[in-house]
Image: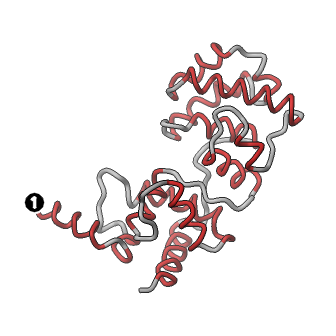
């Protein structure tokens, strides 16, 4: 199987497994998505989805959010971890959205990445899922899969993103990154990995990883 065939196998398999793709984080608009993605740093999506209804009941737009104190925000989002940093980011970005963008979440990387606590991955998720702008957000699942599938060297998230954008057609990016997240969780997790269920890695995976898995399985 050459690389082009591997890429097509990935696309076809994921499309077959996930013809309908739920978004992992509950939201109703770009602002609530932005806040949810910010909260998801070092926190599970399940925990975020349990926490955001409490926050959004008080403030689901930047104008209401700035009426809350940083301490009030921190108390609500504490279950998501890193509450002091995240609450400052949420309050600060809400202020900037009001001052510079009339309360509207901008649809470009430069303006998004200028917001407090918003990095490249957060900006990528918002652009892809809120505005349908082609990006390829790389989380731990995608980073792991690209390495296991021998489609990237695994040296950095930045390199993985470059490789993904180079080898996958741009029209697939927004669907594919979500499909890969779900696949990574269900079929190719970091822990409790069963290669027999991981049909993509078993077919096109890096031989060294498969061999190492098989050695451990024999012990």
Q: How many labels does the image show?
A: 1
Q: Looking at this view, is 30 or 86 the one in front?
A: 86
Q: Viewer-proximal residue, 155 or 69? A: 155
Q: Residues within 10 Å of mark 1 (few under 14, many from 20)?
A: few
Q: Which of 119 and 75 is in front in this view?
A: 119
User: In the figure, 124 relative to 177: above or below?
Assistant: above
- Percent of width and height locating residue 189: 37, 54
Give percent across and percent down for residue 7: 51, 77
Observer-nearest residue: 78 or 88? 88
Find residue 133 and report its image quarter.
bottom right
In this rendering, would 24 be left or right of 112? left
Pointer 1: what residue?
Answer: 219
Which quarter of the figure is the C terminus placed in?
bottom left
Residue 158 placed where, x, y %? Answer: 54, 55
- Residue at left offset 64%, top offset 25%: 54
Q: What element carries label 1?
A: loop
Q: Residue at x 23, y 63 (%)?
A: 213
Residue at x-position 39% and y-position 61%:
187
**Depicted 34 relative to depicted 184: above or below:** above
Q: In this view, does 26 lie to the left or right of 97?
A: left
Residue ranking furthest to the left: 219
Location of residue 33 in the rendering, given as x and y in whole percent from the top left corner:
69, 41
Q: Coloured how?
A: secondary structure
Q: In this view, does 25 lie above or below 188?
A: above
Quadrant of res 170? bottom right
Residue depicted at 53% across the width and 80% down the height:
8
């Amino acid at each position: 199987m050459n690389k082009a065939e591997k890429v097509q196998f990935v696309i076809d398999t994921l499309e077959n497994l996930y013809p309908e793709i739920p978004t992992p984080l509950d939201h109703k608009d770009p602002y609530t998505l932005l806040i949810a993605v910010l909260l998801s740093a070092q926190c599970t999506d399940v925990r975020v989805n349990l926490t955001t209804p409490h926050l959004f009941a008080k403030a689901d737009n930047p104008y209401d959010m700035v009426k809350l104190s940083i301490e009030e925000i921190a108390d609500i989002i504490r279950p998501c971890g890193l509450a002091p940093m995240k609450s400052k980011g949420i309050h600060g970005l809400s202020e900037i959205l009001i001052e510079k963008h009339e309360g509207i979440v901008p649809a470009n990387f430069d303006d998004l990445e200028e917001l407090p606590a918003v990095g490249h991955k957060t900006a990528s998720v918002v652009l892809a899922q809120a505005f349908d702008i082609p990006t390829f957000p790389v989380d731990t699942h995608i980073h792991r899969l690209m390495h296991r599938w021998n489609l990237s060297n695994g040296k950095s998230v930045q390199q993985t993103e470059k490789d993904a954008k180079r080898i996958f057609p741009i029209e697939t990016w927004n669907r594919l990154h979500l499909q890969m997240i779900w696949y990574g969780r269900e079929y190719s997790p970091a822990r409790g990995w069963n290669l027999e269920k991981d049909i993509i890695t078993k077919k096109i995976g890096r031989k060294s990883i498969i061999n190492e898995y098989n050695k451990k399985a024999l012990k």
